[in-house]
Amino acid sequence: MKTRRASIASPQADDPPRFPAADELAVLRAWYAGLPVREAVERYQSALLGGGKSARGVLGRIRRRLQAIARAAHRDDLAALLDHPAEDRARHAKAVAHAIEALRTARPPEPQITDDVAQWLAPRAVRVLHADGIRTLADLTVRIPRRRQWWKAVPGLGVASARAIETF
């Protein structure tokens, strides 16, 4: 009999990732300034190397964390800016420096009743809601009655998506 390992989500699973520490930002800034990635990591975070960890992996984790912070703050423009090939780093250096400072204080906006559901919900649920004529959060609150199994009135919407919408 095969068993499946159950993953237990930590209480902080929904929390946004923490902002990179000063030494992590120093690695990133040094890399954007033209220092090879290995030298940047050795200079500012040498303790993270070894044990199968690569300098590129360290840099990649820092960049991905900043992208996650940008997405959590609904700043997809900044997330896209941080997602570029390594060869383009010199061209993006100044804009990334401004993006880091903007992300330092960025907070997610509050949902507004006139917001499109695509701004707040998962893409699969959005496709189903749009197909049923639900475009804004106002449409969602009006069309969804406060009763059990409300999602059955929306064709294609499953229990998991409905629970995620209820949680939101």
Image (cartoon, helix red, strand yellow):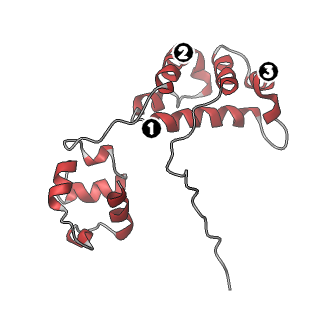
What amino acid type should be assigned to the residue bearing mark 1?
Answer: Arg
**Percent position (x, y) of residue 132?**
18, 60
Furthest toward the right, the residue is 50
Any mark on residue 71, and which?
1
- Mark 3 surroundings: few (<14), some (14-19) or many (≥20) residues within 10 A: some
- The residue at which mark 3 appears reads as 43
Residue that appears at 26% across and 73% down = 148
- The residue at which mark 2 appears reads as 91
What amino acid type should be assigned to the residue bearing mark 2?
Answer: Arg
Residue that appears at 47% across and 26% down = 105
Give whichever of 123, 71 is nearer the camera.
71
Q: Secondary structure at mark 2?
A: helix
**Percent position (x, y) of residue 11?**
55, 55
Furthest toward the front, the residue is 11
Give whichever of 84, 44 is nearer the camera.
44
Among the two numbered marks 1 and 2 on one chain, the one whose residue lies closer to the N terminus? 1
Any mark on residue 149, and which?
none
Q: Are marks 1 and 2 in contact (CB under 8 Å)?
A: no
**Percent position (x, y) of residue 109?**
34, 35
Q: Which of the 4 image quadrants contains residue 97?
A: top right
Comparing labels 3 and 2, the label whose residue is closer to the camera:
3
Among the two numbered marks 3 and 2 on one chain, the one whose residue lies closer to the N terminus? 3
Residue that appears at 82% across and 43% down = 52
Q: Secondary structure at mark 3?
A: helix
Q: Secondary structure at mark 1?
A: helix
Quadrant including the N terminus:
bottom right
Residue that appears at 56% across and 16% down = 93
Residue 166 horizontal side relative to residue 18, left or right: left
Among the two numbered marks 3 and 1 on one chain, the one whose residue lies closer to the N terminus? 3
